[in-house]
Amino acid sequence: MDGLLALKGVIVADDGAVAQNPMARAHRDAAILESLANAFDRLAKERCGEGAKLAALLASQIGEVERLVGEAGRLAAAQPAALRARLTAQIKELLDAVPVSEEKLAQEVALLAVKADVREELDRLTAHVQGARALIASGKGVGRKLDFLAQEFNREANTLCSKSTDIALTRTGLALKAVIDQFREQSQNVE
């Protein structure tokens, strides 16, 4: 503001008729205040409009996160069977006709399945989706909270990708991370 007011010609002292006539001065001051009030009203209206558009965009991104979490859940449900098939094929290839008991194979599959279990991450992502919707619905000073929530979304998506043993689940996790990144960028525009 100081820089703008310091520019030559922005403020010009007019010691003419307005300064000498109290009625003219009062009229000028009233016009300035009315203009300023109109500017503030317009600013508030524009901010409300921008906020509504931003809320719709964030809601859309949250919906996409929710869709991807559902897709990841469906893919993760198939992981134990895929792990078993892959482990069986690898054992056959490595041992080349040396038999491995079904019990031992089942134990190994169970260990791998526990390590690759992403249900906890999916549950947290689902809870974060609900939390984000609640924050947006509240509409009061939620920018920092949404930014923090975006970090939590990202943390869970990273863990999902790192635990994934399936290329389709990894791709879904990467798509999830992309949407979360967009969500985080937009949430930083919210007060």
Image (tube, rainbow, N blue to C red):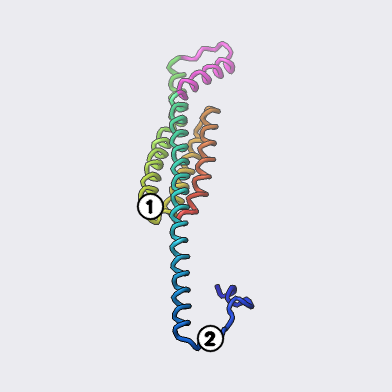
Magenta highlight on residue 146: no
Give the x, y percent position of residue 136: 39, 48
Is 2 rendered above or below residue 110?
below
Q: Residue at x 39, y 44 (%)?
A: 133
Give the x, y percent position of residue 48: 43, 55
Q: Residue tagged by mark 1? A: 139
Q: Nearer the viewer, residue 62 or 71?
A: 62
Distance of label 2 from label 1 (alpha carbons): 50 Å
Find residue 53 and name its label: none
Of pointers 2 and 1, the one earlier in the residue sequence: 2
Magenta highlight on residue 87: yes
Q: Quadrant of the N terminus?
A: bottom right
Give the x, y percent position of residue 179: 51, 40
Q: Residue tagged by mark 2? A: 17
Magenta span: predominant SS is: helix
Q: Nearer the viewer, residue 177 or 139?
A: 139
Q: What is the crowding at mark 1: few (fewer than 14 residues within 10 Å), some, or many (at least 20)?
A: some
Q: Residue at x 38, y 49 (%)?
A: 135
Q: Residue at x 49, y 34 (%)?
A: 163
Residue kind at label 1, given as amino acid type: Gly
**Are the two marked residues, 2 and 1, in contact with CB atoms closer than 8 angstroms?**
no
Q: Is any part of residue 175 visible from this angle?
A: yes
Give the x, y percent position of residue 94: 58, 18
